[in-house]
Image: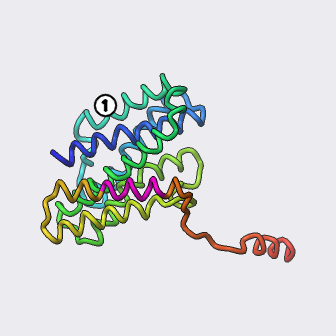
Amino acid sequence: MLLVVLEHAGLAVFAASGALAAVRARLDVFGVVVLGLTTALGGGIIRDVLLGVHPPTTLRGWPYLVVPTATALIVFAFHPQVARLRRAVLLADAIGLGLFTVSGTATALAHGAPGYTACLIGMTTGIGGGALRDLLLREIPLVLRREIYALASLAGAVIVWLGHQLHWPAVPVTVAGAALVVAVRLIALWRRWNAPVARGLGDLSGGSQNRE
């Protein structure tokens, strides 16, 4: 029941994130719904494929489709008001990342996956939908180019795995893992933290042009 609640809450906030990105890209209502569904369901589908769960959990019950679809339509209808809530949208995205990460990790552990596999699957569950969203919009996925996003997700997954290893109560561990993801993500946004990138790219490009 805890995993179901976490997943549905994550579906709503990730669908809102995808739908808002679609509105900004000037997609029609169908495109907004498709992008909302992709962002909300993508991570969970990737998780289930990796775990050998067929058909994926999110395609078995109607609430998994209705919740993100309704959220996407609401964003489409009220996008000016939603767009003005930039901080709220960023907060919702961070919460969705935390919820999907701990849900994916716990699901992987419940299927008997090793610890390192469960952590990677949890991270993939958290970032997968957003990566698919960016690819559909012909953008380099956010997790690969700036801000602390995937690392925050991985940290929360590790907390869930450690709690499982130490046989701590599931609910407090799950809440702690999600809270850590949200905290790291929000602090990274506030402090403008980014993972290091390669230096000297300008010199490399200049050198290649000179050789031509």
Left or right, 72 with respect to 103, comes to right
- Against 141, residue 90 (above or below) is above
Write the residue at 32% across / 54% down: 179
- Seen in the image, is 124 located left or right of residue 132? left
Residue 174: say if magenta.
no
Q: Secondary structure at mark 1?
A: helix
Q: Which residues are magenta?
A: 178-187
Q: Please state the horizontal and vertical placement of residue 151, each as a whole percent of the image.
A: 43, 64
Q: Residue 64 location, x and y as percent?
A: 28, 38
Q: Nearer the viewer, residue 155 or 186?
A: 186
Instruction: Say whether residue 187 is left or right of residue 8.
Output: right
Task: Name the spot of residue 204 as percent of width and height, x first.
Answer: 75, 74
Front residue of this view, candidates 128 and 184: 184
Q: Which residue is mark 1?
A: 66
* Residue at 48% across, 24% down: 78
Applied colour scheme:
rainbow
**x, y (%) of residue 129?**
42, 49
Callout 1, which amino acid? Val
The reply to whether residue 128 is in sight is: yes
Residue 59, compared with residue 156, is above or below; it is: above
Q: Considering the image in quadrants, where does the N terminus appear?
A: top left
Q: Nearer the viewer, residue 182 or 144?
A: 182
Say which residue appears at 23% left-offset and 41% top-offset.
60
Q: Is residue 65 above or below residue 159?
A: above
